[in-house]
Image (spheres, grey):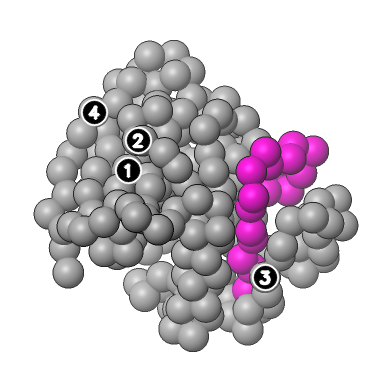
Amino acid sequence: MSRAGERIRLESRADGFSFDAYHVKPGDARRGGLVLIQEIFGVTDHIREVADGFAEDGYEVIAPAFFDRQQRGFEASYAPDDMARAVALSQAAPWNEVAGDAQSAIDALSGPVFVAGFCWGGAASWAVAARCEGVAAASCFYGRRISELIDETPRCPTILHFGKTDASIPLEQVEEIRARHPDIPVHLYDAGHGFASDRRKDYHPDAARLARLRTLQLFTRSGGRGEGA
């Protein structure tokens, strides 16, 4: 059920750049804030749906449009041409700008504030957990580019989700992350890349539900208990 979110404008802590974001509030008791980080495809209908779902769970969600510097309002399909453009935009977004954009979203929410991201957003969530202030916990879904950030360590409780049959993220890469960060839980699922998205061919409902449950449990343990809890 949609919570009738709205578009808002934020200013990056990195350079003052003004960018859009999708904002949706919970309809009942508030458990905290959540910065939801997109896949390479932008703040699509799918991401807005995911944001609405977390709002139903009690989180005030901001989903920033991280590619607005490159192309304002970018939303891509899974067609090859769109995919190529999405990859190019993601590669043109340096992590310091991503962290600055995320910090403005964190600062716009009252605490506790959590972070969750998918695909490119999974790696971005790792960067945010390592670089930003005010993050209570982070959940990173199939972030292939976490390997670029392996020398950085999240400063808050963080969990990772990977698919065992994800051709874009070899298990050797996952094991390298696990070895370098043994205190961070790494969950493996019998699924491929994008298993949490019902728009993707590798969508795996059971894995998606379990990963989401683990994410909500992490948020609850890290302070998202709701009013009166």
Residue visible at 47% across and 70% down in the picture: 212
Residue 187 is marked as 3
Are the residues flagged by discs 1 and 2 in contact, CB closer than 8 Å? yes
Disc 4 target residue = 9
Chain part drawn in magenta = 146-163
N-term mark: 4 or 3: 4
Position of residue 196 relative to residue 33, above or below, is below
Looking at numbered disc 3 in the image, what kind of residue is underneath it?
Answer: His
Are the residues flagged by discs 2 and 3 in contact, CB closer than 8 Å? no
Mark 2 burial class by Cα count in 10 Å: few <14, some 14-19, many 20+ = some
N-term mark: 2 or 4: 4
The mark closer to the camera, 1 or 2, is 2
Residue 19 is marked as none
Q: Residue 108: image x %, image y %? A: 33, 30
Residue lying farthest to the top in this orientation: 15
Disc 1 target residue = 62
The image quadrant that residue 203 belongs to is bottom left
Residue lying farthest to the right in this orientation: 179
Spatial CA span between label 2 and label 4: 13 Å
Quarter of the image with the C terminus in it: bottom left
Residue visible at 73% across and 48% down in the picture: 147
Looking at numbered disc 2 in the image, what kind of residue is underneath it?
Answer: Leu
Q: Residue 133: image x %, image y %? A: 55, 29
Position of residue 121 relative to residue 203, above or below, is above
Q: Residue 106: image x %, image y %? A: 42, 33
Q: Residue 117: image x %, image y %? A: 48, 53
Task: Tell me, yes or no, whether the highlighted magenta stretch contains residue 153.
Answer: yes
Disc 2 target residue = 109
Spatial CA span between label 3 and label 1: 25 Å
N-term mark: 1 or 4: 4
Spatial CA span between label 1 and label 4: 11 Å
